[in-house]
Image: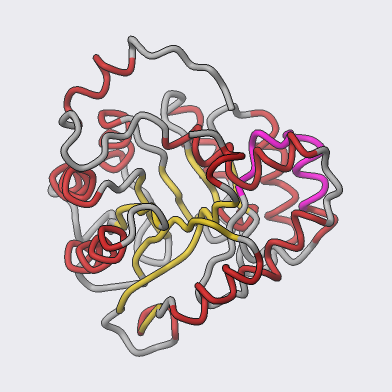
């Protein structure tokens, strides 16, 4: 299905309960109001990942139930903790793919820095990794170098904390490394976002809102104010997400271990 047929995709949204109590990010990510806002803004689908949680296997299952109840409305990424889930990343992620149809991996430096185990699993299963580096943008360069065959989405232009110097440094990595991507969620410095799209091109940027805590309609307006040609805007609004997640099996499809063999037969037609 093409991006024009599927509509706008919010590539970065949280859902389900956390089990902490320090703020919304680890307490709860309810979708009712978020979905009403999406409907008003014309956002057709959302990619869901858990809120912060002490057990991501439990959290991923909660998100999986949401995705499974509305598979035509939601995608999902499996959240993992590099340290706490050490040794079980592969079965966790494979379970999320085969049971829930998840299409990628989510990692956050707030939990722990990304590990080789996570990257190796992403390589083996041919999955994109959405990794929040929290301003450590030099880490994106290492990832691109050590794992050139894995696609990494670094959200917020590298810094949700609005670190101008980190975001500016990240733009260079984004432009130079073919397997480094970003999303637009929480980017408040519009001039840096414009620079990123101009230097790296629209194929390297995904629309995301970091919902439900940020308003998806407000985040979407940033894309519209970029004044891009329709084809370029379509890439950011849906096409890039679909391209990066294409070929990941749906529930009942081929086992993840068969991905490399089956994918080698499939021609990359862009989009």
Q: Quadrant of residue 53?
A: bottom left
Tell me what residue is drawn at x 26 percent, y 82 percent.
19
Q: Quadrant of residue 115?
A: top left
Q: Which residues are magenta?
A: 193-206
Any magenta on residue 200? yes
**Placement of the C terminus among the 4 image quadrants:** top right
- Relative to 211, say whether 108 is above or below: above
> What is the chief secondary structure element of the magenta stretch?
helix
- Relative to 130, say whether 200 is above or below: above
Any magenta on residue 158? no
- Where residue 111 appears, as percent x and y from the top left, is 35, 65
Identity of the residue furthest to the front in this view = 5
Name the image colouring: secondary structure
Q: Quadrant of residue 51?
A: bottom left
- Where residue 242 appears, as percent x and y from the top left, is 49, 38
Tell me what residue is drawn at x 67 percent, y 29 percent.
176
Tell me what residue is drawn at x 58 percent, y 69 percent.
39
Of 253 and 139, which appears nearest the observer? 253
Of 229 and 131, which appears nearest the observer? 229
Instruction: Decide if residue 88 is on the left or right side of residue 171.
Output: left
- Where residue 226 appears, as percent x and y from the top left, is 83, 51
- Where residue 9 appears, as percent x and y from the top left, is 55, 52
- Relative to 156, say whether 259 is above or below: above
Instruction: Decide if residue 128 is on the left or right side of residue 207.
Output: left
Tell me what residue is drawn at x 38 percent, y 14 percent.
266
């Amino acid at each position: 299905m093409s991006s024009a047929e599927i509509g706008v995709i919010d590539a970065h949204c949280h859902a389900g309960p956390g089990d902490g109590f320090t703020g919304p990010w680890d307490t709860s990510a309810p979708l009712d109001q978020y979905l009403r806002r999406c409907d008003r803004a014309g956002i057709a689908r959302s990619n869901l990942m858990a809120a912060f949680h002490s057990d991501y296997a439990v959290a991923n299952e909660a998100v999986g139930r949401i995705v499974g109840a509305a598979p035509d409305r939601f995608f999902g990424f499996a959240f993992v903790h590099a340290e706490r889930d050490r040794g079980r990343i592969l079965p966790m992620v494979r379970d999320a793919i085969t049971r829930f149809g998840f299409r990628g991996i989510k990692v956050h430096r707030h939990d722990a820095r990304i590990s080789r185990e996570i990257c190796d699993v992403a390589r083996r299963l041919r999955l994109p990794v959405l990794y929040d580096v929290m301003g450590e943008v030099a880490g994106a360069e290492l990832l691109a170098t050590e794992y050139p065959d894995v696609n990494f989405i670094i959200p917020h232009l590298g810094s949700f904390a609005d670190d101008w110097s980190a975001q500016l440094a990240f733009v260079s990595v984004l432009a130079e490394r073919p397997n480094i991507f970003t999303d637009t969620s929480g980017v408040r410095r519009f001039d840096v976002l414009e620079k990123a799209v101009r230097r790296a091109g629209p194929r390297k940027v995904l629309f995301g809102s970091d919902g439900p805590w940020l308003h998806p309609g407000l985040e979407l307006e940033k894309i519209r104010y970029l004044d891009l040609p329709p084809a370029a805007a379509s890439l950011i609004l849906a096409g890039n997400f679909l391209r990066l997640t294409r070929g990941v099996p749906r529930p009942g499809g081929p086992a993840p271990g068969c991905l490399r063999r089956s994918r080698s037969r499939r021609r990359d037609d862009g989009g």
